[in-house]
């Protein structure tokens, strides 16, 4: 994150841990890995536990308070972001229930 050209506080793990510290919130990272095994890009995904009649139900992607912008963070500003958008519909299936 520190090496990306989009260095904003909203993408740092310590910041996400702080604003998503309530028991019904968590976050995960979607990572694109280069052939060398190093991170090429990452996008943080904030999750909130949905409730039905007061009972915890499932995790949903939700924009948290105090977190204005979340985006793909990468060292290379010309990186093709298509892989992130092609799997965005599959993210809900990756979340542990």
Image: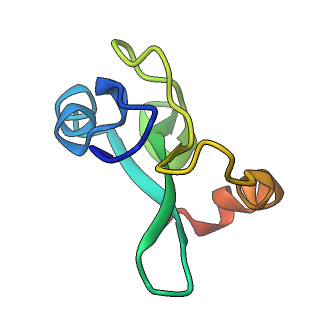
* Left or right position of 11 against 60: left
**58 in relation to 54, above or below:** below
The residue lying at 44 percent from left, 36 percent from top is: 5
**62 in relation to 47, above or below:** above
What colour scheme does the image use?
rainbow
Residue 40 % position (x, y): 51, 64
Residue lying furthest bottom in this view?
36
* Left or right position of 90 against 50: right
Residue 93 % position (x, y): 67, 65
Q: In which image quadrant can residue 48 be found?
A: top left
Q: In which image quadrant can residue 65 be found?
A: top left
Residue 89 % position (x, y): 79, 54
**15 in relation to 80, above or below:** above
The residue lying at 46 percent from left, 42 percent from top is: 47
The residue lying at 83 percent from left, 58 percent from top is: 86
Q: Can the viewer see residue 61 in this picture?
A: yes
- The tally of labels here is 0
Q: Nearer the viewer, residue 94 or 16?
A: 16
Q: Nearer the viewer, residue 59 or 86?
A: 86
The residue lying at 52 percent from left, 57 percent from top is: 41
Q: Nearer the viewer, residue 78 or 64?
A: 78
Q: Can the viewer see residue 97 in this picture?
A: no
């Amino acid at each position: 994150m520190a090496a990306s050209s989009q260095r904003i506080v909203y993408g740092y793990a310590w910041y996400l841990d702080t604003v998503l510290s309530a028991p019904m919130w968590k976050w995960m990272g979607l990572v694109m890995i280069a052939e060398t095994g190093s991170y090429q890009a990452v996008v943080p995904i904030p999750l909130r536990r949905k409730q039905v009649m007061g009972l915890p139900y499932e995790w949903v992607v939700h924009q948290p308070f105090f977190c204005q912008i979340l985006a793909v963070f990468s060292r290379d500003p010309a990186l093709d972001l298509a892989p992130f958008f092609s799997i965005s519909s599959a993210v809900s299936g990756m979340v542990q229930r």
